[in-house]
Image (cartoon, grey):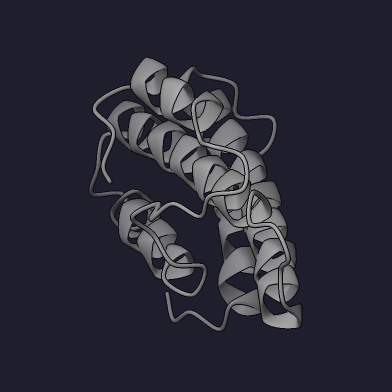
């Protein structure tokens, strides 16, 4: 599911039913490529960082929804537990990347988001 705004995404996260797995619209294996797809144009200097920051904020909230949906399953298997761990890791990356992009988009260049993106790409074996 795609959210049209931050408020909508937050409502969906908060309203996820406990004990029910919900299709969150993303996969734990696909999110790294989604991040790459969002950040690559800005990394190459070909995109508006303000627009990229908005996309990253929405993806961060959607990924949080996915983690919450995965955690809501009662009687999880080992595979489900491993997926939750991976969602947690992705959410930490998204939080860092999104915050650094937001800082740079608002003129604070004390931390360059590109440095963090390089490390992320190395960890997830993504070609830049």
Q: How many marks?
A: 0
Q: Looking at the figure, which quarter contains the C terminus?
A: bottom left
72 shown above or below 85 = above
**Residue at figure coordinates x 56%, y 58% from the top left:** 117
Q: Looking at the picture, how far across and down is residue 34, in whole percent?
A: 37, 61
Q: What residue is at 48 percent from the left and 79 percent from the top?
A: 126
Out of 22 and 89, give the one closest to the viewer. Answer: 22
- Residue 73's spot in the image, x, y percent? 63, 57
Q: Residue at x 64, y 49 (%)?
A: 72
Up the image or down, 86 lies above or below 25; here it is below
Q: Is residue 10 above or below residue 33?
A: above
Is residue 124 among what the camera can see?
yes
Looking at the picture, tell me which residue is in the foreground, 108 or 59. Answer: 59
Image quadrant in which you'd find residue 120 = bottom right
x%, y% of residue 20? 53, 49
Residue 35 lies, with reference to residue 91, above or below; the image says below
- Residue 127, image quadrant: bottom left
Residue 12 on image: x %, y %: 42, 29
**Residue 95 sits in which quadrant?**
top right
Q: Is 76 situated left or right of 118 in this image?
A: right
Q: Is residue 115 visible?
A: no
């Amino acid at each position: 599911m795609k959210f049209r705004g931050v408020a909508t995404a937050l409502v969906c996260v908060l309203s996820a039913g406990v004990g029910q797995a919900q299709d969150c619209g993303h996969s734990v294996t696909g999110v790294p490529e989604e991040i790459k797809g969002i950040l690559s144009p800005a990394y190459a200097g070909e995109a508006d960082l303000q627009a990229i920051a908005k996309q990253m904020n929405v993806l961060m909230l959607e990924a949080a929804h996915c983690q919450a949906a995965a955690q809501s399953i009662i009687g999880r298997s080992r595979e489900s537990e491993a997926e939750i761990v991976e969602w947690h890791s992705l959410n930490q990356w998204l939080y860092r990347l999104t915050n650094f992009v937001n800082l740079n988009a608002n003129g604070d260049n004390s931390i360059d988001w590109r440095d963090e993106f390089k490390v992320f790409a190395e960890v997830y074996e993504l070609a830049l």
